[in-house]
Image (tube, helix red, strand yellow):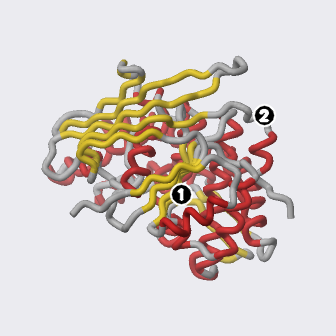
Amino acid sequence: MNNPAKVVKNNRTTKRMHLEKLNLLNFKNYEDASFSFGSQINCFVGENGSGKTNLLDAIYYLCISKSAFASNDAQSIRHGSDFFLVDGFFHVESTAPGETKVYQITCALQKGQRKVILSDKKPYEKLTEHIGRFPVVLIAPDDTDLVREGSEERRRFFDTVLSQIDPDYLVHLMQYNNLLKQRNSMLKLFADQHYSDDDLLDTYDAPLLELAQQLYQRRREFIDLFQPVFQKHYTYLSESREMVDLVYESELTEPGFRRDFRRSRTRDYQLQRTTKGAHKDDFLFEINGFPLKKFGSQGQQKSFVIALKLAQFEIIAHYKQFRPILLLDDIFDKLDDRRIAKLTQMIADDIFGQLFVTDARPERTELFFSRLSAEVKIFRMEKEV
């Protein structure tokens, strides 16, 4: 079967982007470190605990303005320090042939203060202006949590993809989450003070419902686009062994949703939280018409989530007209030979742009990439004593 991702290579995504330099201060286990990267393949090799994944997370933070692994920004501050700084230089080809623009991006956080994101040493007017400028895709061992965990994990995945390609969606999502947080705080306040105020809740409900409808509409449109791309990649990885589906499930599909939302207010008062809305949406993963979580093998689940990430890569490349940075964390230990061979073929076919890989076994990485004609730069990470 032909490699399905060749559409990325041949769909006019001729511009290239790469991270040239990265400087770290007090980020996780890094006190003070600087790196210069190659524009193609970069490998971080060393023992577990040497900071390989933390380095990938620093790159992810620079692109997305948050950690891929820590839920709280302060958790990325090195133990014993009161701030961190991540600074990098991105090279992005312009539309003019042969011209490249260099952007310096700086992310910093001081304990007890708001984080700062700078572009060429100037703050963004809005943080949303940064998301999607330097797109990134991460494939990591815990990706199968998308299958095993609840709907929040799956919404976060699709929200991250959409936020990198659609600035309006990101704005609406942030507005919705902010209103939801305020409404839930109000419900808790009512419970604490033993009273209720329907008129006050109405002032939250009207804009919340409008934003919920906008999120639902965009998610529905996106799944229609994403589904065939995802299925194509799964077919490639599994060699057409079974059929898979993504099913978008939302209460907003119901004709009487607004009425039901209003009727649920009594329950909201009791539970002190908003029980209906776009924050309850789910994306169901199915294999041969059955839930993947119950009926999919470990191998099928891994193929499913890798296909999700490859589809994410292709969709972003299509929208941005250049390829995202791809981060592969410890995949050689977690994938079987067949899936590694499929990814290897994609790397050999120059499907991806700049690639960052971690591996605990240097000899395996050197052997693996010695077979490719691409430029490979290997960084040997030393574990702190």
What type is the residue that disc 1 sits on? Answer: Leu
- Real-space Cα separation, disc 1 to disc 2, in angstroms: 25 Å
- Residue 351 vertical position relative to residue 15 in the rendered view, above or below: below
Image quadrant containing the N terminus: bottom right
334 to the left or right of 193? right
Q: Residues within 10 Å of mark 1 (few under 14, many from 20)?
A: some
Q: Position of residue 6 (x, y in %)?
A: 79, 49
Q: Nearer the viewer, residue 360 or 245?
A: 360
- Picture disc at residue 12: 2
Q: Amino acid at mark 2?
A: Arg
Residue 196 visible from this viewpoint: no
**Is the C terminus in the top left, top right, bottom left or bottom right quadrant?**
bottom left
Per the image, the residue denoted by label 1 is 328
Q: Work out whether residue 178 or residue 274 is closer to the camera in this orientation and state it.
A: 178
Q: Position of residue 22 (x, y in %)?
A: 40, 38
Residues tagged 1 and 2 counted as in contact (Cβ below 8 A): no
On the rendered structure, is 275 left or right of 254? left
What residue is rendered at 54% in x and 58% in y? 139
Residue 137 lies left or right of residue 239; in this view the side is left
Q: Residue furthest right?
A: 1
Residue 78, percent from left and from top: 22, 49
